Amino acid sequence: MYGIREVLLTQERNDYHEHLSQAAFKLDCSMGSNPYGVWPGLQCPADLFADIAVYPPSDEPVQKGICRYFSGVADLQPENVLLTCGSIGAILTLNRMILVPGKHILGVGPQFSAVVDDFVTYEAQYHPVYLKPENNYSFVVEDFLAAMRQYPGAYIYIDNPNNPTGQVIPLEASRQIVALARELDSFVVMDEAYGDYMDNSQSAIQLIDSYDNLAVVRTFAKGMGAAGIRLGYLLAQPQIISAANKVNVPYSKNQIAEHVACSLLESGWAQQCVERVRENKPKVLAALKNIKAAVTDNGVSITMLYVDNERINLCDLLEQVGIRAITGVGYAGIGQNMVRLNLHEDIDQLVECIRAADELVGRQN
């Protein structure tokens, strides 16, 4: 119709936005924004809006701030940094850079569903390597390496920490993946949207200097507590940044986002939030008896909860006790008996609601 690609007219999107419940709730534990909100020390200078009538100036202040932020683990320069419209903007830019119809793509099942939707729009061939219930959905690097050998030249997308489980893939596993990918002529995207919740010692950012087939994606939306400024970035060797910039949205950063980003990079807010997550997440996990939690890291704000009974709609059940979560429907490899739960600042009420949900599951089993 009018030259619109048929796949866009017929595609059914599986992004969890499409399945977000509109029912009433006490606690919103659905979207992956920072449970503790914005940095309380953030201030707006009087002249912040003085220049918004013109297009944004150089990205260099934010690029240099990012380089300083990771200086303990990597020697980054501004030419290693490309600013984008959120982390999703970075991934869509990388997809535009590489994907063509029929391109083989390897990922993890489950993982960030909005990216998988974008794979479909390119009419690419997506092959998720499923996390296995018998391993409590833990990532097994040997399984992924075996799949890579089946699809040499494939485009590889991995989110780390994994969305929805919140588990962290160790740096050594990431190194094995990127090294084999280079041998197989494959490009790797490590989506570290939740990366501020894991220790920098596990970040693939450390691999950028050694591998020219790698891009690492980050955002200010999660641990930094600034989802509303819609600013993300990708990190890679300069030739990758140059190529990606040719298909990136121009002026992805604005002056307001620049001020907020530079402030947050120096604030220590993400580290403070990780400490609170590490204190509070175990309280939620300890409240579970009939509901299970997949392998997860206690420093990451999200967790995948599930029940073995596939007839139970766990998202609906959580709504009965006042929690809005993200249903497993739409994620590759999981279903309605699973949810992604984001922590909430009111940890006492969250634990109370989780216990009530757990009791409901016990009655249905």
Image: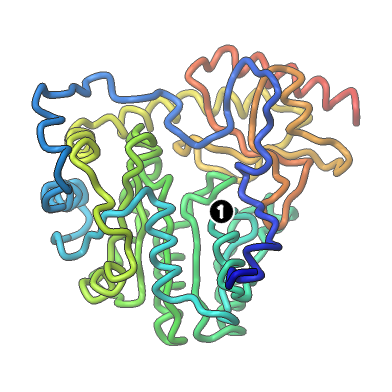
Q: Residue at x 77, y 20 (%)?
A: 320
Helix, strand or loop status at disc 1 = helix
Q: Position of residue 140 (x, y in %)?
A: 59, 63
Q: Amino acid at mark 1?
A: Ala
Residue at position x 62%, y 39% from top? 340
For the view shown, which residue lies furthest in the front direction?
2
Residue 173: x %, y % from top left: 46, 65
Write the residue at 53% across / 17% down.
347
- Image spot of residue 96 (x, y percent): 43, 70
Residue 175 locus on image (x, y percent): 39, 69
Quadrant that contains the N terminus: bottom right
How has the structure been colored for display?
A: rainbow
Judge the density around disc 1: few (<14), some (14-19), many (≥20) Cα neighbours within 10 Å.
some
Give the image quarter of residue 215: bottom left
Left or right: residue 240 compared with residue 354: left
| Quadrant occupied by the C terminus | top right
Total number of numbered labels? 1
The answer to whether residue 84 is left or right of residue 182 is: left
Residue 170's place in the image compared with 294, above or below, is below
- Give the answer, above or below, for where 361 lies relative to 75: above
Check disc 1 and report the residue beneath it: 114
Q: Residue at x 60, y 34 (%)?
A: 341
**Between 7 and 40, the one nearer to me in the picture:** 7
